[in-house]
Image (cartoon, rainbow, N blue to C red):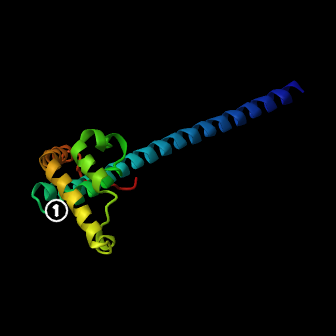
Amino acid sequence: MSLDTTTLAIAGGVIIFGLASYAGYLLLQLKKQNELQQQHRLLAIEKRNANIFESVRVLCMAGIQGQCDLSEISIRLYNIMDYVQGEQRVDFDQEYPATSELFHIVKDMARGEARQSLVKKERMQQNLARHKAESRLQEAIVVELERLQRHVEPLNKQIDIQMV
């Protein structure tokens, strides 16, 4: 009986060792898969941020060159920079106060078709308020746009993502 018991104990030990080894292998594979998923997530965030920074660069150039109203630039920049993720995220109110101030002044003003449907007096009042704010903040905003453009230039790297 002792031989049968010993044989069964050895067989049981081998089976347990085999299952434990397989479980260890599966845990290692799971760890590798999680690391790859994390890398893929980070690359996707970098690619998305690079696309955002390319748009920001173009908007900054348009604002610096006077190709677009500063109020429109401030609205677009403030909103698009809100989508930046990760370490490259910027506190826009803190870093670019003049652009942020103009955004907060004009963000609730009517735009597009809604602007056209306003009563003439109200539309003129909004125009006046917007032009006053743009004139007052113009120099500071252009300086901020140049600084923002320099800030996003090195971050705007196109990343090729391939499935592994």
Residue nearest the viewer, comparing 106 with 81? 106
Tell which residue pokes out farthest to the left in this image: 65
Residue drawn at x 26%, y 62% is: 126
Above/below status of 4 relative to 60? above
Q: Is residue 8 above or below residue 161?
A: above
Q: Quadrant of the N terminus?
A: top right
Asked if residue 20 lies left or right of residue 40, the reply is right
Residue 83 image point, x, y percent: 36, 52
- Relative side of 47 to 152, left or right: right
Question: Is residue 22 or residue 6 the one in the foreground?
Answer: 22
Using residue 87 as the reference point, say whether residue 31 is left or right of it: right
Please count the marks in the image: 1
The crowd level at tag 1 (other Cα within 10 Å; few <14, some 14-19, many 20+) is: some
| Most distant residue in the top direction | 2
Can you give x and y, in whole percent of width and height, for residue 88 in the image? 30, 42
Point 23% across, 50% down: residue: 157
Residue 50 appears anywhere in the view? no
Residue at the right extreme?
Answer: 1
Taking the spot 22% from the left edge, 63% from the top edge, the residue there is 127
At x 14%, y 47%, the residue is: 146
List x then y, in percent, for residue 161.
33, 54
Q: Which quarter of the figure has residue 125?
A: bottom left
Q: Which residue is mark 1?
A: 68
Visible in this render: residue 10?
Answer: yes
Give the SS element for disc 1.
loop
**Which residue sits furthest front?**
121
Give the camera-side residue of 41 and 129.
129
> Residue 3's spot in the image, x, y percent?
84, 27
| Circle 1: residue type | Cys
- Residue nearest the observer in this picture, 93 or 102: 102
